[in-house]
Amino acid sequence: MSIQAKFIKFHDKIKLGREDAEYKSAREKDDSILKAVKKALKEEGYPVIEDFLQGSQSTATAVKHPVEDFDIDRSVVIAFDDAPEDPVKVKKIVLKVLEDRGFKNAKIKKPCVTADYASLSLHIDIPLYREQNGEYELAVGKKNSKDENKVWSSSDPKGLRDWINNKNDYVGSAIDKLKQYKRIVRYLKRWRDVKFSSDVAKKVFSIALTVMAKEQFKPNFDANGKASDLIALRDTVSAILNGWYFNSQGNEQYKVSVDLPTSPYRDIFDGSSVNTGTQLYNKLTSLKNKLDKVIVEDDVIKQCKLLNEIFGDDFEVPSSTSNASATAKATYVTAGVAGTSQGA
Amino acid sequence: MVDIDELVEHLCSRDFNCQKSPIDLFKIISVKLTISGKPIELIHLLTDEITGLPVFSLSSPNDSGQLAHVSIFDFNGLDLGYICVNDRDSVSVNFSMPLLAIEESLRRHIDILTKGITDPEWNRHELLREFSSNWLGVCDLKNKRMLLTSASGKLEEIDVLRPLPNNNHGVNSYHLAQSQDSELSEIASLYWNNNTSKRAKAGKAIIIPLISVEPAPLNKEELKSWYLNALISVKPENKKLLNEQYGCWSSREYWIIFNVDVPSGKTWFCLHFQANKKHSLPLTTEQMKHWKIKAIPLRLFNKENVLPRGGANLDLAYRRVALIGAGSVGGEIAHKLSSAGIENLDIFDKDYYSIDNLYRHILPEEFLEIPKSYGLGFQLQRQFLWSKAKGIFEKLLSLRNRQKLMSYDLIIIAIGSPTHERLFKEYLIENEIDVPVINTWLEGFGVGGHATLDIPDANGCLLCAYVCQETLARGLNSNLNFIEANQNVTINLAGCGEQFISYGAICSAQTALIASDLAIKYLEEKITTSSKVSWKGSDYDANDNNIQLTHRYHQFSDSLQIKSLHDEDCDACS
């Protein structure tokens, strides 16, 4: 069994997809809440014309957090012509739905309506948009904001998702390379959740790791097309460290800055502390050095031990090199049929 | 043309005794020299253009005795010796510097004459080694040639059948002497008309093995004495049979076909005897008085003679191979395996040959509407005359029969159906059928083709070529593929059921070549591990059709190279 197989096994363990069993309850709640939100908005004269997932669920980069909640970012769109002048008006309707359903901590934040599910590890964010001719505007404003702070703000909610999912720059097996990129993002997220204290980890934003990894991604496949996530991760981390995100503040202190690649192009780490930047820089450097050691190590078990130190216990250390992977036959589970180019 | 005076001056400056012909009309030079005290004269006729190694002929060749690599020919009533200076096509001649080319050629001619004159042992060895070529020098080339199908060369009396009337080419234009031990295919026999109902019987031929032989005679006048002398080298028991049995039959015509071992292998040659009245076979000087004797060209047609000349391997004759798929790739594979010497080839296919197949299949149109496998079996037996190839109207999945499969040394699957191929592989695993299998397929748009060799109990199997490189589980498409999965790679000209993958006969042939090469190397025991091989073509057509190619395609630079098939993440191998 190759070290790549160990990475895939690790990835299968940490990835959080809408179809995963662990997410089943969350998905059901999401569906149920969405139905209620649509009904309430419609009754108030604001029929929902579109809804879509945002965040890591929409880009297949979500990971299970070792201890914390699942997130759902469910965007809801109403028609431009139906939308009230005051964007908070529709946010209040959504808030009421959440409150009536017994959510904890339901509140209107500036960009969305947010709440925690009472009996599940589930956190939900619902941004609202109005749309006209493909142009989206986000409902901005809190419950008691001044009128000037309650605005429909031009936004590109799908642009970031499309940017992350873009594979046009990859030559050959582009889909496989995009998938490798997304695995790298998940590895980095899990590494963050394991290596940083809870407080700092929250400030090492997932979207920042996602953007840096995308901009610096170094795919790695051997000549036969087999992926090496280990080398791709090492090379990507190395490129991130050299990628002008870290500004030295002297005395080996750093500030980190990562711009969103789409509108509104703001710095994701705007207002971030030197401590966050320094910790991120140092821990990424340590990660890169450890990955170097893994790469030169021949023994798979020793490699797994080092990777276990990096990623935690979800990266399993096998008891022997004899084949732990020989899962039952025919474990191809992602497709019932695949189009083929084979002929004779 | 080089200036003759300039040439003479050049050769003289190189210490050759060179003169030009006193008659200006003939652009001829002569070079005189002495080898071991023997005066030698070489003649060169200048040519308008130097297109090969310049030729020097030996003047008065009979004066030099029988020399290896020298054959006598008549030039306007004059005997000259043609000197064979190895294969003239095997040298690249500097035609821009004709003086140097002629000088170098002269030296090579002198070298070979010197060797023959000064080293009698080498000279005799070479004369025997080239017996067959020298024999042609005394053959009557106007005579109809004799075609003999004999494998063993043992003493045997056989009928000689006349050529079919009005046949000036092909086997039917030969006299045919068919030995009892001939193993020609049934189809070949049909086309050769090798029976007396189709061809008239001309007489008897007797195959006589000799213990040894003297060099071929220099001229036709020596044939009688040479023949009687050759009879001394007949084994006593064979001589007894000749006297008491084979030679007793009276006839106006006899053919004697000798075979004997010479340094270059077994050589065969033929004498034709003709008399005005019927006589028994002449075995003495007295009996020879009734007969005219001619040497005639003999073409031996047996496996040992024909197969190695074409690069085939006699050892492959007894290996049993099943080929599943008689499409454009399978057809080419069948052809290449047969040409390599594989006789026992069973071809399985359930498709009929159609007009749509014509431009990428090796079968001609006469096989339209019949099963491709039958057509191939027939065609192969027709071309490869010892082939036992046969077509069977069955498909891969109906071959799931342990006993049947175990009877083969190798199974080759060329159907381009990953679903059926994987199903078949699982059957082999579940039933522990340890027959090696080659799977081969090509991809559309000329991007390439692949072959895998799965040897049971060796590292690597077909499923290694199906390890999904993303999930490392068993995949549905081969990881060798150059075209990404889930694209529309078919072309549809006439609606449902008429889709086809775009590729031409060249792609089929290329793919068949790598598969055949793998098969032959395995059967010859040159490959003992599970292997894979691919060829990569250009991406022009794929790009034109917006077809996405794989990482492997872009990285691949090992076309035709045989690599290990093993994938460490294959669950079946592990």
Image (tube, coloured by chain):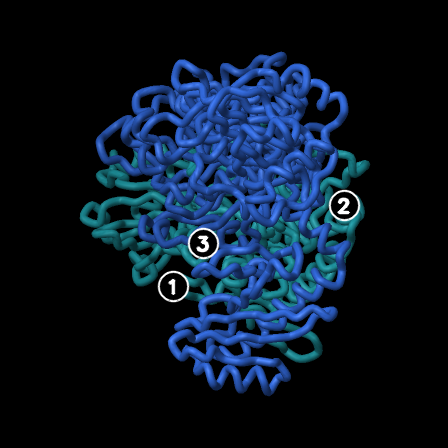
The residue where tag 3 is placed is A164
Q: Position of residue B444 (x, y in %)?
A: 39, 42
**Which residue is rendered at x = 66% and y = 28% of the image?**
B284
Discs 1, 2: same chain: yes
In this orientation, which residue lies closer to the viewer: B173 or A207?
Answer: B173
User: Is B160 or B531 nearer to us in this picture?
Assistant: B160
* Quarter of the rendering containing residue B570: top right
Secondary structure beneath dot 1 equals: loop
Query: In the image, what residue type sits under mark 1?
Result: Pro
For the residue marked with disc 2, what is the amino acid?
Answer: Val
The disc, 1 or 2, on the residue closer to the chain's N-terminal end is: 1
Identify which residue, B432 or B253, lies in the foreground: B253
- In-front residue for pair A148/A116: A116
- Locate the N terminus of chain B by quadrant: bottom left
Q: Which mark is residue A300?
A: 2
Name which residue type carries label 3: Ile
- Residue drawn where x is 47% and y is 35% of the image: B145
Between tags 3 and 1, which lies in front?
Answer: 3
Dot 2 or dot 3, earlier in sequence: 3
Label 1 sits on residue: A264
Given the current orientation, which residue lies at the most extreme left position? A81
Q: Colour of chain A?
A: cyan
Q: Residue at x 40, y 44 (%)?
A: B506
Q: Report, in whole angstroms, how far the alpha carbon at label 1 lies from the one at label 2.
A: 45 Å
Chain letter, blue: B
> Which is nearer the N-term, disc 3 or disc 1?
3
Residue A201 shows up from this direction:
yes
Decide if residue B389 is on the left or right side of residue A77. Answer: right
